[in-house]
Image (cartoon, helix red, strand yellow):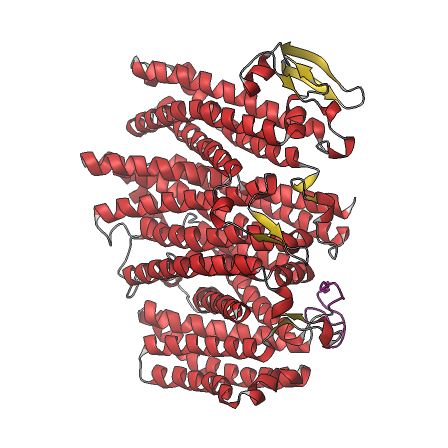
Amino acid sequence: MTPELIHRLHFAFTITFHYLFPQLTMGLALLIVVLKSIALRNGGEVWDQAARFWARIFGINFVFGVVTGIPMEFEFGTNWARFSQVSGGVIGQPLAMEGVFSFFLESAFLGLFLYGEKRISKRMHWMSAVMVWLGSWISGFFIIVTDAWMQHPVAYSRLPNGQFEVVSFWKLLLNPWGLLQYMHNMTGAVVTASFVMAAVGAFYLLDGKNKEYGRIFTRVGVIAGLASTILIIFPTGDLHGKYVAKNQPAAIAGMEGLFKTETGAGIVLIGQPNEETGEIDNPLVVNNVLSFLIYGTTKAEVTGLDRIPRDQWPSALPLLYYSYHIMAGLGTYFVALMIAAAFLLWRKKLYSSRWILWLLLISFPFPYIANTAGWMTAEIGRQPWLIYGLMRTSEGYSHVVSSGNGLFTLIGFMGLYALLGLLFTVLVYREISHGPTPQAKELRAAIAD
Amino acid sequence: MMGFIWFWLVAVMIVGYVVLDGFDLGVGILHLFLPRTEGEKRSSLRSIGPVWDGNEVWLLAGGGTLYFAFPLLYASAFSGFYLPLMIVLWLLVLRGVTLELRNHIDVGVWLALLDGVFGLSSAMLAIFYGAALANVLRGVPLAADGYFFLPLWTNFQPGVHPGILDWYTVIGGLVALVALTLHGALWLTIKVSGELEKRACRIINPLLVILMLLTVASLIGTIAVRPASLNNYYHYPFTFVVPAGVLAALGGIWWFNQKQQPVRAFISSGLYLFFMLAGACWGVYPTLLPATTGGERDITLSRALSGPHTLSVGLAWWLFGMALAVGYVVFVYSRFNGKVDGDTAAH
């Protein structure tokens, strides 16, 4: 195994595992603000109780996000030293800003939100929920700015020693790639949180316990889910896709499995890309759709891989293709499911339609898969570049860290994270089993004392 | 000028991290033996519950600041200290998770396991941090391109090709272990009451004596391993106020503890950490990472500094952002002011 591969796997594994947590943190922070706002307006204790239940799950999830997040900032230096050396002047900036502007805010008010409800007024408690939400979304913004610069470098110059330097701070922050990706990604986080909330609600309704809360969770989950699953496709996904097509033709060709440049290119719904023959095996294609989606006309020409030098093809082509198709396929399913659920909610039949409650319950893992696949699409699509067009991945890893040492710590992380995954599941399972009612909480406190 | 400013801004972040996360690491170390009943363990943990992850943010924000202000240093040090940093990361993961788990688990056997892992990971983190600082003071075998890679240990001798651990860095680790344990004990005397408070008070003086001895040993060791550490002090003799400050702070801990003024004793301990770190920074300045392979290979301020526009833009938002951050920190600590025992609102 080459050092380059080990360092790529190292980052890929730890970031993929990490992002299972922030996507729920960011989406749930918004939904908790919704619950707290309703509680504040109508003074309903039930809504406060609902918010407290989700705050407990949020707290667990947040800690797992924090502890798996710290390694990410370190890995830029430990595993990608040569990349960090040249890019620190640019992307070190948003990474430091994340700490300074977001983490202080988020952690301070999360402490207050989780531990301080009895020490502060109702309004202040609502305020701290808002601050936690803002903190988590600001954090997401700076990470996207960082990634966006690697995808689509802007506002930089090169110093004599080879290092990049920012020439315009605002252009770096307002990188169009970043803004589009941010909208798309944050909507994705809301999709995850909506599905999780709806699934817990559906579980309580199917189980017959905590039905009052089951109805609240399903309702909030389905309404937020309907909005976010539509927004994730249109306009955010649509705009982002068009921007990728314009700026990374190799990525879009790989995502769509388009080996040959075509006018009136069709979209491949199913099929396996065959790099050896340059064709899609067992294809199911809808004609002209790809041209229409990218350029708004069925006749437009879409660049295929044949126009791209072989050494600039995305290096894991089939994985890119599958990631994108999994994301897009699941996204389509999400809209269908949420439209059906929202329709039943409107007809006042949702809480008694067991078939859709079952679907809502078992569908909660899919947004996690879709979000992960989406990020894989973005990052594999960027390959073989580390900074698009400027620095290759093979030039960026830490040359002083041998593949043996890299593999040692990769295996260490795999073991540790397997344990974390188990613990997280057990903890959240327990919270959901205890339920949101005050009685359950008191009972728990009594057992604990 | 920018180099001077950013050097000290990064130093401020490190001091902020050590002083703040230091006491919750200390509470973690004390968790191994100080609180005996389940109630005591809970009050001890409740004293850091709302603040520990905010304290860890100083590490992240400091790391980020280092990254953009001194990219070469960040790249070289993080890849060169690869193995110990990965171990630090694992310890941080274990520590954070066991602390959180403790709020959710109520089976005695598991609690004992969690307490053990939490305490040991806290202790090892303290040792690693101390050893890390000592590694920077001693220097590393930098190659001409500014990179190096250190094994965990070689022959335990500081030389041209040392390991992470040698006799000098082990002393550094022990200083940090004892200093943070003391820092944590002082925090507990502010935050808890009853038997636990009394026990925390009783271990302060013994810890103080050990810390005094280790501090002197580490100062002698530093001068022996890298005599150049004294150059700045001889050049600007008034800066001997820093080592004097170390001793004064130690005295302050003793004095205020005798007079039962725990807040002032805790602040003195914070000052001790501040003077120790400031003294170390001043000892290497303007070098950031000395080379054991010859002074011309040192990573110096000017060699590692980012571009001028990056730094001036960075200064604007950094000062603004940190002013906000300090505001939050003060606000949160004031909300959780006072002893924890009356408070049952743990989540």
Residue B328 place in picture, x, y as percent: 34, 58
Tell which of A362 and A230 is nearer to you. A230
Quick check: A154 left or right of B255? Answer: right
Magenta region, main secondary structure: loop
Residue B228 colored magenta?
A: no
Side of B121 relative to B247 (left or right): right
Residue at left offset 47%, top offset 47%:
A170
* B145 sits left or right of A298 in the view: right
Is residue B254 at least partly visible in the picture? yes
Q: How many marks?
A: 0
Which of the two residues, A111 or A318, is positioned nearer the viewer here?
Answer: A318
Does A328 appear above or below A32? above
Q: Nearer the viewer, residue B38 or A38?
A: A38
Which residue lies at the image location 48% right of the left edge and 57% below the top edge? B313
Residue A37: percent from left, percent from top? 26, 37
Q: Is residue B160 magenta?
A: yes
Q: Is residue B109 visible?
A: no
B25 shown above or below A293: below
Closest to the observer: A313 or A357?
A313
Residue lying furthest top: A287
> Residue A255: x percent and y percent?
64, 25
In magenta, the rendered stretch is B142-165
Query: Outermost residue toward the right?
Result: A276
Compared to B267, does A375 lie above or below?
A: above
Q: Quadrant of residue A378?
A: top right
- Left or right placement of residue A137 versus residue A50 in this view: right
Where, quadrant-wise, is the N terminus of chain A in this rendering?
Answer: top right
**Residue A301 at x, y = what percent?**
64, 17
